[in-house]
Image (cartoon, rainbow, N blue to C red):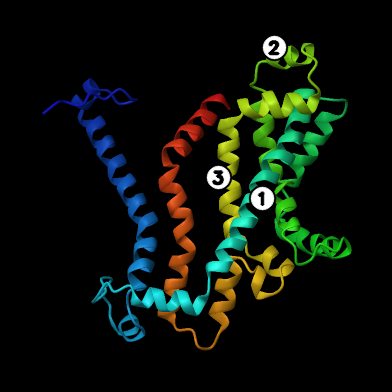
Amino acid sequence: MKKILRTGVIREYDMHSPSVKAGYGFIIILCCLMVVLAVFPLVWVTLAGFKNLKEFVSSTSIIPQSFSLEPFTTTWSQLGIARNYLNSLISVVGSVLCALVFNGLLGYGIGILKPKGHSIVKKLVLLSLLMPPTISIVPLFMNIQKLHLGNSFVPLWLSFGANAMYVILFVQFFETLPASIIEASRIDGCSQLQTFFNIVLPLSKPICAVISIFAVNAAWSDFLLPYLVLRGADKQTVMVRLFVFSTEQTVNADAMMRSVVFAMIPPIILFFIFQKQLTENAVSVGIKG
C-alpha cells in the first residue's frame, strides 16, 4: 500500500510527536462532529418523508419501515410545486445577474476608477452594513408600489443589485488587479464600460463565482420580499409556496417534511455539480484577498 505523504501544515515527521498526534486526532474528531451536525438534519428530513403520518407520529426510529416513493409523488401532486420551481429559477437568475453587474460596476468605480469622493461612498457602503436589513422593508415596499413594480420579479432582482457586502468583495478584489492592464485598455481606446465588461469582469471569475454562490443561496431562500411583492399562485416562489402549503388545514406533518425535501433538492444538486469549482474559487479569493 502506497504511503501518503503529508504536505500541509502538519508534515510526516511532525506526527512523531505525541502532542501533535493528539492535536491532529482532536481536529479530525471535531471535523467529523461538524459534518454530522451539518448533514444529520438533511438526512432526518429526507428519511422522515418516507413515513406516513401514523409512523411519523408514533415511531421513534429514524429509519422508515419502507422506502416507497408513493408518498413523495402524492405530495408533489398535492403541492403543485413545478410552477414554483420555475418562478424561483427566474428570481435566482435575475438576482445573480444584477448582483454581478450592478455591484460590480460600483466596485469598479470605487476600487479602480476612484473618482473624487470615492472614499466617502465606500464609507457609506460600509456604514450600510451596520443597518439591519429589516428596517428597509417598509420604505422599499412603498417605493415598489409607487413605481408600479408590484407583482413583478424586477424588485427581487434589483434588491440583489444593491448589496453592500457584494460591493466590498468586488472592491477588495479589484484593488488586487494590476493597474497596467487597465492602463493598456485605455491606451487601446476602450471606454470604461468596455474595460469593465471585456477585461475586468473576465479577470474576476473567482470573486464572481463566490458572489454568485451567495446570491443563489439568498435568492432561493428569500421569503419576505417575494411574499410581499408577488401576488397570486402563478408567481409564488418555492419558499412562499411552502409557507402557503403549511397553512392549509389538510396538510399533515409528514407531507410538510416531503415538501421541505423538494425545496432542498435544487441547491444540493448545484452543490454536487459545482463542488470542485466552488472550492477552488473560494480558496483563490482567500489567497488574493
**Mark 1 vs mark 3, CA separation in Å:** 11 Å
- Residue 82 location, x and y as percent? 53, 68
Residue drawn 68% across the image and 23% down it = 199
- Residue 254 location, x and y as percent? 40, 79
Question: Is residue 22 shown above or below 176?
Answer: below
Q: Badge 1 is on which residue?
A: 95
Residue drawn 48% across the image and 39% down it = 278
Q: The disc labelled 2 sits on which kind of residue? A: Ser
Q: Is the residue marked by circle 3 packed among few (<14), some (14-19), or many (20+) residues within 10 Å?
A: some
Element at label 2: helix
Residue drawn 46% across the image and 32% down it = 280
Query: Which disc, if any, is residue 180?
Result: 2
Q: Is the residue marked by circle 2 packed among few (<14), some (14-19), or many (20+) residues within 10 Å?
A: few
User: In front: 176, or 119?
Assistant: 176
Residue drawn 53% across the image and 88% down it = 249
- Point out the image quarter for the N terminus: top left
Q: The disc labelled 3 sits on which kind of residue? A: Ile
Q: Is the residue marked by circle 1 packed among few (<14), some (14-19), or many (20+) residues within 10 Å?
A: many
- Label 1–label 3 contact, CB within 8 A: no
Q: Badge 3 is on which residue?
A: 213
Task: Answer yes or no: is residue 238 visible.
Answer: no
Task: Answer yes or no: is residue 113 visible.
Answer: yes
Element at label 1: helix
Q: The disc labelled 1 sits on which kind of residue? A: Ser
**Mark 2 vs mark 1, CA separation in Å:** 32 Å
243 left or right, relative to 54:
right
- Residue 61 location, x and y as percent? 25, 74
